[in-house]
Image: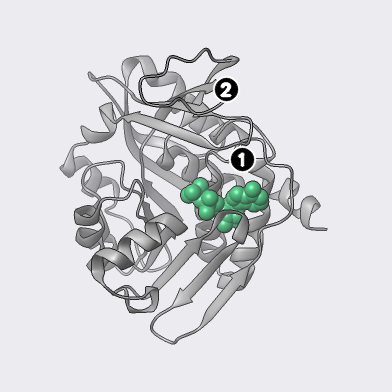
């Protein structure tokens, strides 16, 4: 089973002719509101990939619809608290080339109660996976508990913050980075990827595919990105991470997990939106056949 200590954001998405420059006022061509947040995206992706998922997180009262939407994808939302603070939200601009820029307000994601988080993880064990990203409080404590109880911990180092990543390294089984985050981490630590002190890494490189690296054995696996017409790359990395985690949690090899995750992420980028645009396992299977 997958436990995901994860953010829940309401995404406000504006399609713009180009990403706004400093000082520029720009009219958007369209506006949509959707479910997002790296945590919610990864929960939905893992559930769409067929995993049993318990999401641990929080929203504000006006964000209760987001909790219901997550539940609608088959995720257990019993550990999503409704707090008296604003729901986390993101202002996302997307240009015609599908490039995006994002402003985040963390809100309820930063107001989680440590005791409640640890209580939600009480039953985690060696057959389970904990997912964390860098958008909620208490990830290191949750990861320490999960590892102590024998679970696999998959940590997405995003949004990148060196101190936050360093706090997670001792408790992480698989560190997930995109290309920019990988460069930032290696520059900060003054080492190459295979010297980062975690057992395994998953590095996604957009149109250049993704790589799994096992530092313990030196094993590596690579998957190319599938050729698609990209319209919105928001959530591609989360779709990849959620599918990859679900496949490993189900006992698949890293190589097979990469294949499924690359197909799921490629399908996602052909669709506008984030959580609501993540494909199901049967869509991914059709795409691969
Ligand atoms: P993030 O969204 O975290 O920045 P990436 O940009 O690395 O992550 O994308 C994650 C994965 O999504 C890639 O490894 C790739 O498999 C897939 N992907 C991203 N962009 C494209 C694209 N334009 N075409 C096909 N696949 C893509």
Q: Give the secondary structure at mark 1.
A: loop
Residue at x 60%, y 72% (from the top left corner):
222
Q: Nearer the N terminus, badge 2 or badge 1?
A: 2
Tell me, for residue 15, which label it has, or none: 2
Q: How is the image coloured?
A: one colour
Q: Give the secondary structure at mark 2.
A: strand
In whole angstroms, how far apart are the C-alphas of marks 2 and 1?
19 Å
**Residue 248 at x, y percent in the picture:** 52, 65
Tell me, for residue 278, which label it has, or none: 1
* For residue 125, above or below residue 275: below
**Residue 277 at x, y percent in the picture:** 62, 35
Q: Classify residue 154 by image quadrant.
A: bottom left
* For residue 255, above or below residue 286: below
The verdict on label 2 being within 8 Å of ligand 1 is no
**Residue 187 at x, y percent in the picture:** 30, 65
Residue 23 visible in rendering: yes
Residue 279 visible in rendering: no
The verdict on label 1 being within 8 Å of ligand 1 is no
Residue at x 55%, y 34% (from the top left corner):
274
């Amino acid at each position: 089973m997958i436990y995901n200590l994860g953010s829940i954001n309401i995404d406000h998405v504006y399609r713009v002719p180009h990403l706004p420059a400093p000082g520029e006022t720009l009219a958007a061509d369209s506006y949509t509101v959707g479910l997002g947040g790296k945590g919610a995206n990864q929960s939905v992706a893992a559930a769409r990939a067929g995993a049993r998922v318990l999401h641990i997180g929080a929203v504000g009262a006006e964000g209760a619809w987001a909790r219901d939407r997550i539940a609608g994808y088959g995720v257990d939302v019993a550990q999503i608290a409704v707090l008296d603070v604003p729901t986390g939200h993101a202002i996302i601009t997307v240009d015609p080339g599908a490039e995006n820029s994002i402003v985040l307000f963390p809100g309820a994601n930063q107001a989680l109660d440590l005791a409640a988080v640890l209580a939600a993880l009480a039953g985690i064990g060696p057959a389970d996976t904990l997912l964390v990203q860098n958008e909620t409080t208490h990830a290191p404590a949750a990861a320490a508990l999960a590892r102590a109880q024998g679970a696999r911990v998959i940590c997405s180092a995003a949004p990148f913050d060196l101190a936050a990543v360093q706090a997670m390294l001792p408790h992480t089984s698989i560190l997930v980075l995109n290309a920019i985050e990988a460069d930032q981490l290696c520059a900060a630590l003054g080492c190459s990827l295979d010297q980062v002190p975690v057992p395994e890494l998953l590095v996604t490189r957009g149109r250049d595919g993704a790589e799994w690296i096992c530092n313990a054995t030196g094993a590596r696996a690579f998957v190319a990105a599938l050729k698609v017409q990209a319209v919105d790359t928001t959530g591609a990395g989360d779709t990849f991470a959620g599918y990859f985690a679900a496949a490993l949690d189900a006992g698949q090899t890293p190589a097979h997990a990469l294949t499924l995750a690359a197909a799921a992420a490629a399908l996602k980028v052909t669709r506008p939106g984030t959580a609501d645009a993540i494909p199901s396992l049967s869509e991914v299977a059709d795409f691969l056949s």
